[in-house]
């Protein structure tokens, strides 16, 4: 199923479906394997635009984890909650999205602590949901926490840090704080000019500099590797991976 998850991340839904069919649910016995299979089904539906089916599958997975999983499944619970919240963002259900994402943040903290980079994805989505409801103070607090974690765990010169600055600027603009927004936007642009370009697929770098680079979504697609966006972070749905 890990290969199916990679295919979903690359947008290769046909190949992901083949991998999923190669391991039918009836053959799975481990809680983590069953949960991952349900997550793959949901991610496939979301990738294909069937958000109703995706949400049903994510909620089935969430209920399964709560019935059968222990503390070791908390990260999967957090990922599933984030994915449901992300679906609501795509459907512009801001209040519902915020509720799911608040639960995802709480679950992520329980799974990994308060400073793990996994938390940045959830906090970014939460900030968007709060911004869309004009909850400026809450949105600013969420994005500032995510930015602090990104700087500490990934480094100042990292694409995620720049994306967080762009999101912060967007929140400030939406709140009418134009001058502050321009300053943050300039900081993001300055930082982005100093970020080393992504490597073409297949190349490797010294591990001490690895965190300064962003990987292509598809190792075989060097065109994707060259893309570097200046857009605020979109709602992020994670394809499930089996924990090590």
Image (cartoon, rainbow, N blue to C red):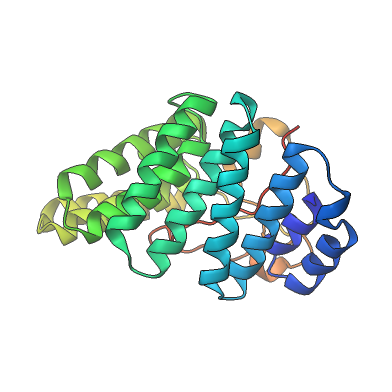
User: Relative to the observer, which residue lies in front, 217 or 185?
Assistant: 217
Q: Residue at x 52, y 62 (%)?
A: 55
Compared to residue 146, the image places residue 59 above or below, namely below
Task: Give the percent coordinates (x, y) of residue 105.
Answer: 41, 37
Q: Residue at x 55, y 40 (%)?
A: 77
Relative to 222, is 186 on the left or the right?
left
Compared to residue 188, the image places residue 141 above or below, namely above
Task: Give the percent coordinates (x, y) of residue 243.
Answer: 72, 35
Q: Residue at x 57, y 69 (%)?
A: 53
Compared to residue 175, the image places residue 115 above or below, namely above
In the picture, residue 148 is in which quadrant? top left
In the picture, residue 40 is in which quadrant? bottom right
Q: Residue at x 73, y 38 (%)?
A: 31
The reply to whether residue 195 is in sight is no
Task: Give the percent coordinates (x, y) of residue 5.
Answer: 73, 55
User: Relative to the observer, which residue lies in front, 188 or 20?
Assistant: 20
Relative to 172, is 48 on the left or the right?
right
Q: Which quadrant: the C terminus? A: top right
The reply to whether residue 42 is in sight is yes
Task: Give the percent coordinates (x, y) of residue 235.
Answer: 44, 59
Q: Name the residue furthest front.
A: 67
Compared to residue 221, the image places residue 123 above or below, namely above
């Amino acid at each position: 199923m890990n290969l199916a998850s990679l295919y979903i991340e690359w947008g290769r839904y046909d190949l992901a479906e083949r991998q999923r069919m190669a391991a039918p649910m009836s053959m799975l016995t481990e809680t983590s394997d069953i949960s991952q299979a349900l997550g793959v089904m949901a991610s496939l539906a979301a990738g294909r635009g069937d958000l109703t089916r995706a949400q049903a599958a994510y909620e089935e997975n969430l209920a399964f984890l709560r019935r059968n999983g222990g503390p070791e499944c908390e990260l999967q619970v957090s990922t599933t909650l984030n994915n449901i919240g992300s679906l609501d963002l795509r459907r512009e259900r801001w209040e519902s999205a915020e509720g799911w994402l608040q639960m995802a943040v709480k679950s992520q903290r329980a799974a990994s602590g308060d400073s793990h980079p996994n938390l940045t994805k959830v906090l970014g989505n939460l900030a968007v949901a709060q911004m869309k409801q004009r909850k400026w103070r809450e949105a600013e607090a969420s994005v500032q926490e995510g930015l602090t974690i990104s700087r500490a765990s990934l480094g100042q010169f990292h694409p995620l840090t720049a994306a967080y600055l762009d999101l912060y600027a967007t929140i400030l603009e939406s709140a009418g704080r134009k001058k502050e927004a321009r300053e943050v936007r300039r900081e993001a642009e300055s930082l982005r000019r100093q970020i080393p370009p992504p490597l073409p697929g297949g190349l490797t770098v010294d591990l001490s500099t690895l965190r300064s680079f962003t990987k292509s979504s598809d190792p075989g697609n060097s065109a994707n590797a060259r893309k570097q966006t200046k857009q605020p972070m979109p709602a992020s749905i994670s394809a499930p991976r089996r924990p090590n």
